[in-house]
Amino acid sequence: MKKTLFLSPPTFDGYDGGAGSRYQCKREVKSFWYPTWLAQLAALVPGSKLIDAPARGLSLDVLLRTAGDYEFLVIYTSTPSFLNDTKVAEAYKAANPNLLIGFCGPHVAINNESSIQASTAIDFVCDTEFDFTIQEIAQGAALEDVVGITILKDGKAHFTGKRPLIEDMDTLPWVTDVYKRDLVTSDYYNGYMLHPYMSLYTGRGCKSRCTFCLWPQTIAGHNYRTRSVANVAAEIKSARDTFPEIKEFFFDDDTLTDNRANVEALAVELGKLGVTWSCNAKANVPYETLKIMKDNGLRLLLVGFESGDQKILNNIKKGILVTRAKEFTRNCHELGILIHGTFIMGLPGETRETIESTIQYAQELNPKTIQVSLPAAYPGTFLYTQAKENGWLIAEDGDQLVSENGVQNSILDYPHLSRAEIFDAVDTFYKRFYFRPGKMASLFFDMCKDWSVMKRQLREGVEFFRFLWGRENTA
Ligand code: SF4
């Protein structure tokens, strides 16, 4: 095996853009997802090292001190950070000219030709699912013989061919062993999970076709492939015993609840382990399934409501009825399942009226916490092509997705609704959701119950206000 470094590179301060982040930007409160895709690679390459520079607060200068220790560097990149990550690769190559450097992630899978030509420091870029591709290269295979990469050949981009997606997900080794070896669990937190938490996958792919959603349309596909329940339960049992400090496990599958039989069986096994857990869900899970999940340790669901306007939900192919989402939310409230609801301002069809109705919808649903974002039209998504064709996109290369300080930019501009109005709607949404007497009282009540919660929420409150004040639409 080559001596291999898997790197989530340093970039904007507080930028959550690593290999576990669905859309890449600086958050309302400082948050980091576990770099799970990179950890999966590291688990396939014995003796490797995983460094999550943003979460650890490591600068490039510090990282370069050990550049000579490695033969192979793999960088997980994102559309907003690609230019920055290319500079990181160039600095590594300058420090260690013999270093083989490869990039992976949706951005290079979609823009393979321009990415391989972006810098001579990059030796190859990966296509879609890249786990065994990287393992083969780390084992010493010649780049030309490896399926699933783009290299430069005679000065031109050369794609070595499509690698099939992994069918047997149990062939992937456990990421939590790499977490133990290379990560610090207290580095990972966000505003709605217990601290410290731990996230991992039980499967990849999502059968839904939401037009804005990055991973299913680029690297993971629309066939939801899951690990066996026994395999997941064994990993959680091991992680529970290895990391006694972990208060909550989060299953970051695109939509864990898509396979009901599977999630119900998994819930029963998790219940036997006595762990607290949470996951992503669509707002269509039936009461009976929710009950089984809740009875077996489920604490919170992360739910993409996106909009309260049915036409917008249809426009983005969400496959959800507003009436069904309301019933689902009522059921969660009744069962005591907390919801972190996510909404998007500025989707196709948005008007001043739908912004208002979605804010009222969120108030009516009243999830525990919310996240309001702007449409991230990433290359490779239906939304990106649609926006380009309709002239809504203010910049095509994606480097305007975030501002210079890493905060999400408003990049869609409609004839009837400007990007500035869309941008401002995010602030309005947050303020009108949180600054209600009932909501503030409930958050204050939670703080009073637990001193550690109070300390954390006060810190996050300060960060949240700073975020709102510091938002600046610079594109
Ligand atoms: S349901 Fe969620 S994960 Fe699946 S495509 Fe839609 S937004 Fe993406």
Image (tube, grey):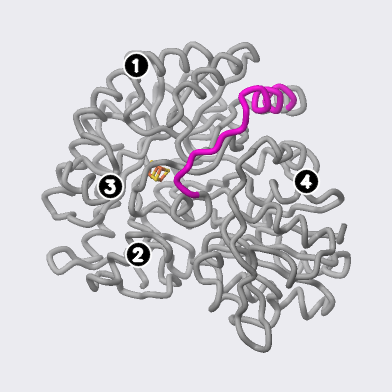
Amino acid, disc 3: Lys
Q: Would residue 93 appear left or right of 425 to someone viewing this image? A: right
Mark closer to the chain start, 3 or 1:
1
> Gap in Å between the C-alphas at discs 3 and 4?
39 Å
Residue shown at the point (18%, 54%) measured from the top left: 350
According to the picture, the residue beneath numbered tag 4 turns out to be 182
Secondary structure state at the residue bearing disc 2: helix
* Mark toward the viewer: 4 or 1: 1
According to the picture, the residue beneath numbered tag 1 turns out to be 287
Q: Residues within 10 Å of mark 1 (few under 14, many from 20)?
A: some
Mark closer to the chain start, 2 or 1:
1
Mark closer to the chain start, 4 or 2:
4
Q: Are marks 2 and 3 in contact (CB under 8 Å)?
A: no
Residue found farthest to the bottom: 155
Q: Residues within 10 Å of mark 4 (few under 14, many from 20)?
A: some
Q: Is residue 134 above or below residue 144?
A: above
Amino acid, disc 1: Tyr
According to the picture, the residue beneath numbered tag 2 turns out to be 384
Q: Tell me where the magenta segment starts and ends, as one range.
A: 221-238
* Mark toward the viewer: 3 or 1: 3
> Gap in Å between the C-alphas at discs 2 and 1?
35 Å
According to the picture, the residue beneath numbered tag 3 turns out to be 317
Image quarter in which the N terminus is found: bottom right
Considering depth in this image, is 3 or 317 the residue closer to the camera? 317
Q: Are marks 4 and 1 in contact (CB under 8 Å)?
A: no
